[in-house]
Image (cartoon, grey):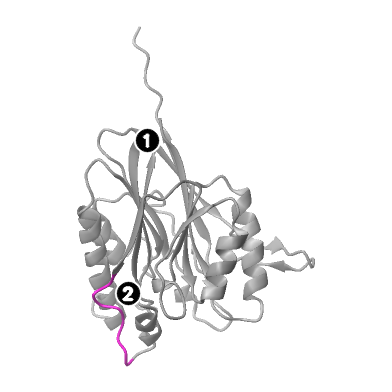
Amino acid sequence: MLNFTTLTMNCFGVPTPTTRRRLRILSDALNQLDADVVCLQEVQAHPYRRLLIKACTGYPHHAYTPFAHAPKGGLLTLSRHPITESRFVLYRTRGLWYTPALADWILHKGVLFTHLQINEQPIVLMNTHLTANYSGDWSPKNRFAQQEWSQLQQLAELVNLQPADHLVMVAGDFNIPRGSWLSDQFLEQSGLIDPMAGNLQPTFRSWTGMPMRYAAAIDFNLVRVPPALKLNIESAFRFDNKVQAPTGRELYLSDHTAIEVRLTSQPVAEVS
């Protein structure tokens, strides 16, 4: 039997006057969930990484790869279960240095692997954050879309290298719209299932003055189930509404919505 829940969220952990206070509120909200693992992106400074690890008391285990000013790739994975192994794989292409994607290059974006074993079932979680598309144009000839496609191809290769008996979860801010040629071809190459398929509700809230084309379903929580494992798969948005801060002020926990995926073993039919 396996009951396993993951949550992914770009937590907008960038330096602002309110970031620390907002991340503390987010940590309290995460502690109240029954998720087994939380995959966070955009943890862009070590003080925020330390805050999240300390404040998320419900998740005593964590994985990240140390880097100069932040966890490598801005990635942090929190777990209620012991982690058997973790490692980081750098994307071969990480953004064009002569464009705004220089910020993505500096952060060294890639994939954070976290391995667990629950009820004898090996599980590998791949937490990732792809290069942003600063033009909001995902057509095949767009230079940012081409960079994203290169990263998606590498990500598909990494998924296909995982043993067939492993439950594989790939979660993060992909910066590509659900239902685009990029997501469709990636799902075909990787063999992953998107429990949110067909749901185009934006997971990124565009900022004031930003064109609405940027408000898209760009966050994913994907699954590859071993053939021998029969699971029910359910998904839901989390933290898509404002919450009340201790000061009484209402705020969003991030500029992204979280996606939760819940896996439960199918009951075995009784033989009469």
Residue 56 is situated, as x and y percent measured from the top left of the image, at 59, 57
Q: Which mark is residue 29?
A: none
**Which element carries disc 1, helix, strand or loop?**
strand
**Which element carries disc 2, helix, strand or loop?**
loop
Which residue shows up at 40% across the image and 76% down it? 67
- Which of marks 2 and 1 precedes in the sequence? 2
Q: Quadrant of residue 99?
A: bottom left
> Spatial distance from mark 1 to mark 2, Cα to Cα?
33 Å
The image quadrant where one finds the N terminus is top left
Q: Quadrant of residue 112?
A: bottom left
Residue 224 is situated, as x and y percent measured from the top left of the image, at 30, 47
Question: Which-is-in-front pick, marks 1 and 2?
Answer: 1
Q: In the rendered structure, does residue 50 fall within the stretch colored magenta?
A: no
Please name the predominant secondary structure of the magenta segment in the image.
loop
Name the residue furthest bottom. Answer: 98
* Camera-side residue of 126 and 63: 63
Residue 155 is situated, as x and y percent measured from the top left of the image, at 26, 63
- In contact (CB < 8 Å): disc 1 and disc 2: no
Q: In the rendered structure, does residue 96 fall within the stretch colored magenta?
A: yes
Image: 34 above or below 99: above
Q: Which residues are magenta?
A: 90-98
Q: Residue 170 vs residue 258: left or right? A: left
* Camera-side residue of 42 and 261: 42
Image: 137 above or below 159: below
Q: Identify the amino acid type marked 2.
A: Trp
Which residue shows up at 37% across the image and 21% down it? 268
* Residue 59 visible in the current orientation: yes
Q: Identify the amino acid type marked 1.
A: Leu
The image quadrant where one finds the C terminus is top left
Disc 2: which residue: 138
Name the residue furthest right. Answer: 248
Disc 1: which residue: 231
